[in-house]
Amino acid sequence: MKRTTLFFILIVSAAALFAAPDFKAVLKQVDDLSDFGKQDYSAVYDIVTEKPGDKPSAMQIKIFRRDQHDQIVILFQKPESQKGQGYLKIDDNVWFYDPESGNYSHSTMKENISNTKAKNSDFKKYTFADDFDVVKSDEGKLGIFDVWILTLQAKNNEVSYQKIRLTIRKDKPIPLKEEDFSVSDRLMRTTYFLPTYVEAAGRLVPAKIKMVDEINKGEQSVLTISDVLVAPLPDKVFTKTFLEQAQ
Amino acid sequence: METIKLALRNLSRQKRRTFLLGGAIAFGIMIVTVINGFVGAFIINISENFANLAAGHIFVQGVEKSSSGKELEVIHDDSVLLQAAKEAGIPAKYLTKRSSIDQGTLVFAGKTATLTIDGVDFASETFLPDRLVFEQGGMEGMRDRQGLIISEPIAKRLDVQIGDRVLAQFKTYTGQNNVGEFAIAGITVDPGILGSMAGYANKDYVNELLNLSPTDYQTLGFYLPSLDGMDQYGTALYTKLKAEAQVFDRSTTSQSQNFVRAMMQQGKTETWTGVKYRVYTLNDMLAQVKQIVDVLNKASLVILIVLFLIIVVGIINTFRIIMYERIREIGTMRSIGMQRRDVRNLFLYEATFLALGGVIVGILLALLIMGVVSLVNFGLNSPLFIILKNGHMTFRLTVARTVTDVVIVGLLTLGAAFFPARMAARLDPAVALRTVK
């Protein structure tokens, strides 16, 4: 009897050990890691973009986020020629402001930031669990990390990419690599979240991100984060007036 | 009758003076007529070229609002549109049903170019191949489902040849990123700044890439036999369609005087379910071009007036000189019985014949210049493409405008001659006869 009980316990333990986790929950953890909830978040990103035959171009943007209300402001700080330009997202509306003309134009979170490989949506909190279903999971190793490789299929036809292959560390719900596929199932962009992090309000924010354009070979952007701050921001930051006065 | 003969004789007596004065009038009317001819054809050529680029004269776009509030351009079922068009009596020569990859990026061997790719059903749009002038390749390449026709500047920029396969990066009709592969089937001659940014592909493949179903499309275009009646048919279609379906208001708003822009704005602020239609015409799209035409028309009128004010000063001075030159002659004619009125009329007839001669010569010269210029072939790849007709500059004169110009010239010349004529008529014959020049 004792032997049977022991055998049963061993079997259950082994099953628990080797059973795949609830990937939906894993995705939710990934999302939560980027969600600052009721806290406001700001950070500066230096973006260096390389294109074959061109000199690397550098730009700097400052991000202001209020995740609780899904609000984001992206303010261009460098180069001088684009200083003062910016995006403002309130609810489902995204505006682009150009200080030279003083005009706003409607935009989307799917737009690229200037000529970089980064999109506006790359700077908002993740919504993998809400927008995607996990259709396939694999195990693997990326560098020194054991990883889950999850294939995600969009739940609706309005998210930027129809399919994403997300490589997530097994030890912590931190993405290491994101491969974005077109509707026609062609790899368009690979994002590498290099495993150096900045801690902000108990969350790990990747300090360096590399985005590789898989269509335009040789083109890539490297994003380096600095001045990460999790602290209340004035309400006026998330207004058009702020963008107009920010220059 | 004698006065008229005298007037003609006087003009022929002073050939050089008549030639110079008449020449000045002819030059003025020639310049203004050429400008009028150019402006008259300008809007027609632009409209016709735009009609070819935009594939129609009257357009209907279907717009859905997604659950997230995004506008999705699509027409699923066009039966209500076709019925409304029938009821509106639109005499469509052709119908175009197109889907469009807006601002796609073509990628080939590290080079990129941005263009809009129109999905065309070549089986029904049989007129399009006739309008395309191929430099390389042709329609046979479009048998390949992934065939693509691009313009020469795009081909040069990408450094592609017929048969090369290029990638196209763009967004689906719901805004998702997508990539397609096209085979270069044809390279057309540079159709100018607007046309060069447009490419043509098979609609079923474009629909697949846009994530539309094979029978869907985005814009219905009606080609009319001519530009005449375009606005009237557009309004009739709008009225008929409004009774059967959801239609964007065509009235302007305070934010925008152009209602096409106002309709776009409505789409962003309103919510609705199902498909809502935008009805607009080529004239609506070219409203700003029409403003340019209005400005050109006003400018030509100002040029006419300024030119003739200068000429009027010349005529006044010349007729005053003529009066002093002929002062003893006037005295003699008055002494032998010529009435004051006849003396005044003599001067006015001279001015009238001068104006008439100048106007006729000026218009003839203008016609000659316009004829010669319109013979020049600027080529289909001219940067002036949009204002040309098949590579030629054309001119169009309206009778009303020409008559107006002639009347203005006539009145100004008569006005200029009137005061010296009156002065001559009021001369005392005895004083005139005594005057020594």
Image (cartoon, coloured by chain):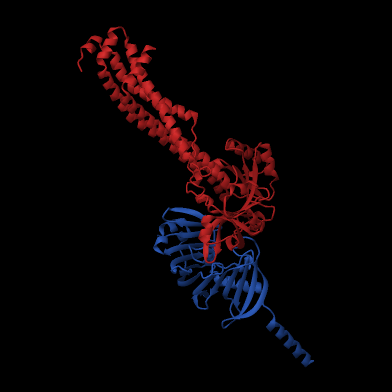
* Above-or-below relation of A130 to B338: below
Q: Residue at x 21, y 14 (%)?
A: B435
Question: Is residue B87 something one can see in this rendering?
Answer: yes
A167 or B306: nearer the eye?
A: B306
Whether residue A107 is visible to the viewer of this picture, yes or no, is no
From the viewer's side, name the closer residue of A242 and A115.
A115
Where does the C terminus of chain B fall, quadrant-wise?
top left
| Whether residue B415 is situated above or below residue B28 in the rendered picture | above
Report how many numbered discs are placed on residues in the image: 0
Picture layout, residue B47 above or below residue A174? above
Instruction: Where is residue B46? Give x, y as percent.
Output: 52, 42
Q: Position of residue A54 (x, y in %)?
A: 45, 67
Relative side of B290 to B313, left or right: right
Image x and y of residue A35, in percent: 55, 69
Residue at 49 percent across and 74 percent down: it is: A208
- At which x and y percent is residue B3? 36, 13
Q: Nearer the viewer, residue B249 or B139?
A: B139
Q: Chain A, which colour? A: blue
Q: Colour of chain B?
A: red
